């Protein structure tokens, strides 16, 4: 591969992106960059300020996205497949905030892969994950958030004129196909 290819893997927190990526690593070589980790590292580097992953949604989303872009530029390799594990919407204390397509454009995303699952399953996963502190949301709220997340990915893909794939979690065996087309 002569140049880098950036794939944005998005979906709600708790949908199973990390689990899916573990399966993908069995058949595909890629650099994984986590949006939250890039933002935290940039904030630490620039401001000497540590922010826990689950508190990022409480900060200024535009500032966080600027940190994401600079962190990506500093961390991403020049060649190969890069998977950015991130979101198209952020569940903030003031409501849902859609990430601007300009953020994805700045990091040269070449395709979107949106992971979706049944909202009740997502709710159960979120409740059982003791490592994270997420806003408490009903399955109905999560279904609405998931729909808005898919629509935001659609708008971003349309603005960038890149492919969009919506992948149900149960199709994890095929995820490498969606990441490396």
Image (tube, rainbow, N blue to C red):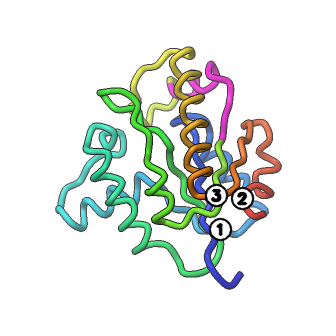
Q: Which residue is mark 2?
A: 179
Return the x and y of residue 95 as percentages of the image width and height: 36, 27
Comparing marks 2 and 3, which lies closer to the viewer? 3
First in sequence: mark 1 vs mark 2: 1
Q: Are marks 1 and 2 in contact (CB under 8 Å)?
A: yes
Return the x and y of residue 143 as percentages of the image width and height: 59, 22
Return the x and y of residue 101 as percentages of the image width and height: 49, 52
Q: 72 or 54, which is in the foreground?
A: 72
Q: Which residue is mark 1?
A: 30
Q: Residue at x 58, y 30 (%)?
A: 146
Q: Which residues are magenta?
A: 115-126
Which quadrant of the figure has residue 139? top right
Q: Secondary structure at mark 2?
A: helix
Return the x and y of residue 92 as percentages of the image width and height: 34, 32
Q: Residue at x 55, y 22 (%)?
A: 144
Which quadrant of the figure has residue 78? bottom right
Comparing marks 1 and 3, which lies closer to the viewer? 3
First in sequence: mark 2 vs mark 3: 3
Q: Which residue is mark 3?
A: 161
Spatial separation of the CA atoms under disc 2 and disc 3: 17 Å
First in sequence: mark 1 vs mark 3: 1
> Few, some or many C-alpha atoms within 10 Å of disc 3 (few <14, some 14-19, many ≥20)?
few
């Amino acid at each position: 591969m002569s140049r880098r290819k950036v794939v944005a893997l998005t979906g709600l927190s708790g949908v199973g992106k990390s689990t899916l990526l573990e399966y993908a690593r069995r058949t595909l070589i890629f650099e994984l960059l986590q949006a939250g980790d890039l933002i935290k590292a940039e904030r630490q580097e620039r401001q000497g300020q540590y922010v826990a992953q689950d508190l990022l949604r409480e900060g200024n989303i535009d500032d966080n996205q600027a940190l994401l872009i600079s962190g990506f530029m500093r961390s991403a390799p020049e060649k190969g497949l890069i998977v950015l594990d991130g979101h198209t919407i952020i569940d903030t204390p003031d409501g849902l905030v859609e990430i601007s397509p300009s953020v994805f454009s700045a990091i040269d995303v070449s395709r979107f892969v949106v992971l979706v699952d049944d909202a009740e399953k997502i709710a159960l996963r979120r409740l059982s994950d003791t490592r994270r502190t997420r806003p408490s949301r009903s399955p109905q709220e999560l279904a609405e958030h998931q729909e808005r997340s898919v629509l935001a990915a659609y708008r971003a893909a349309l603005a960038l004129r890149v492919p969009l794939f919506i992948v149900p979690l149960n199709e994890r065996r095929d995820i490498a196909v969606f990441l490396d087309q």
